[in-house]
Amino acid sequence: MKTRFACQDCGAYAPKWLGRCPECGAYNTMVEEPIEKKKTTRKAKGSQPVSLQDIPFTKKDRKSVGMSELDRVLGGGFVKGSLVLLGGDPGIGKSTLMLQISALLARNGSHILYASGEESPHQIRIRAERLGSIAASIDLLSETELDSILDSARDLNPELMVIDSIQTIYKSSLTSAPGSVAQVRECGGDLMRFAKEREVTTVLIGHVTKFGVIAGPKTLEHIVDTVLYFEGDKTQQYRILRAIKNRFGSTNEIGVFEMTEAGLSEVANPSSLFISDSTASGSAVTSVIEGTRPLLVEVQALTSPTSFNYPQRVATGIDYRRLAMLLAVLERRVGINVHGVDCFVNAVGGIKVVEPSCDLGLILAIASSMKNKAIEKGTVLIGEVGLGGEVRPVYGLESRLNEADKLGFKAAIIPRKGMRNLKKHKIDVVTVDEVKEAVKITLN
């Protein structure tokens, strides 16, 4: 039988074993698998094209989960017959979240099938007792063979089916091991067809590799309708659930949860998690928008004389290349020498800040650390910084200021061009054109 080698991280193929994957660059991930011979049959007649306007339109019904944070990420709840992939680091709370969701839906009259290939029913019962997630209409199935799981699903006809996890499921017709590229791809395809034909909402739990991607071939992400990813450290108290892909909603929404002894609980006001009452130098509060939700985030900077030939640049939760650009702007356009200092920046709360609206807050946090002078408490800084040192307008300025006003902030420094059509606020708004002007206002 002919064989080939496939990368367990990205799904790339190679005719021979390689120590490093040529696609993703991962080491020791190439696994040998047999090439299955597929019988080709010629169809008598293929499907015919249909005019788009002749296709009947029906709105997909959504089922509210019962958690407003998760409903927000999903776009309003589970869509009937959708296939969802939930990924995250081991121990971050994937199984806990799905068991809580199963109990909430079961109490509202839904029938749930929870198929676990990693834990016994007794282990799941112990967790359910701790979480208070006991419900009679949740059926547990400890099985790893896909056909057996699908047979049980056909008999029970559940509204929600949970597969925990996709790496443990296998098809007996394939000779490769569970978790291999071929097994994950084929099992994912069969589950997708079952979900669409029977209109059973199906959630696949997937592990994350050391490279930070969901284990298994990348084709699995193309098969599913929605990809949800848990962000955060399992040693921390808070978790962020982000939609990476969503065919039925926005891909920018996030849900914030707190891990407690009773499981994951929703955080009603996420902005309060990412800001503190710190009055130290090097701390600034800025605003980002995740989907439709404005969030206030505290960014911190610490600078100190370097002991090396090359100064260190360490960024946590912030793009390293963005940091390097802002340091160059600060030195060239403002005149603050950062060439001989180490610079460490951090986004508080474990959130990843990618929006350019945080540029002004970040660059002023670095300037505050350099001057060893704190920014006045109750001030929020909003604006994108250009290479010429100019402060550019950002979208959603109205909602950002409303969020700052709601949390008790007294002043906001924003781009002058962003004042157009801006409503009056209780918050004191100060406008600037350049970073140099903003530094002078806040730190002099």
Image: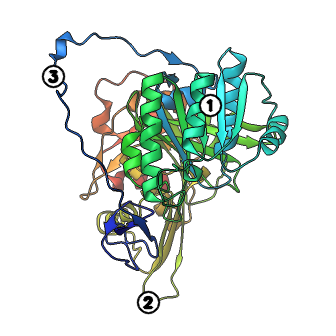
Q: CA distance from mark 1 to mark 3?
A: 34 Å
Q: Residue at x 35, y 61 (%)?
A: 35
28 or 40: nearer the viewer: 40
Above or below — where is 322 with respect to 140? below
* Amino acid residing under circle 1: Ser
> What is the quadrant of residue 134 in the picture?
top right
* Amino acid residing under circle 3: Gln
Instruction: Say the numbered circle drawn on residue 388.
Output: none
Task: Answer few, some or many: residues within 10 Å of disc 3's Cα (few below 14, many 20 plus, some between 14 and 19).
Answer: few
Q: Secondary structure at mark 3?
A: loop
Q: CA distance from mark 3 to mark 2?
A: 69 Å
| Left or right placement of residue 178 versus residue 217 in this view | right
246 or 268: nearer the viewer: 246
> What is the quadrant of residue 52 in the picture?
top left
> What is the quadrant of residue 362 in the picture?
bottom left
Residue 252: x %, y % from top left: 42, 37
Q: Which label's residue is closer to the chain start, 1 or 2?
A: 1
The residue tagged 1 is 152
Above or below — where is 257 with respect to 29? above
Residue 301: x %, y % from top left: 53, 62
Q: Quadrant of the N terminus?
A: bottom left
Q: Residue at x 33, y 65 (%)?
A: 13
Q: Secondary structure at mark 2?
A: loop
Residue found farthest to the bottom: 309
Q: Residue at x 41, y 73 (%)?
A: 338
The residue tagged 2 is 309
Instruction: Say the numbered circle drawn on residue 48.
Output: 3
Q: Residue at x 33, y 39 (%)?
A: 394
* Amino acid residing under circle 2: Asn
Q: Tell me if I can see residue 95 in this picture.
A: yes
Q: CA distance from mark 1 to mark 2?
A: 65 Å
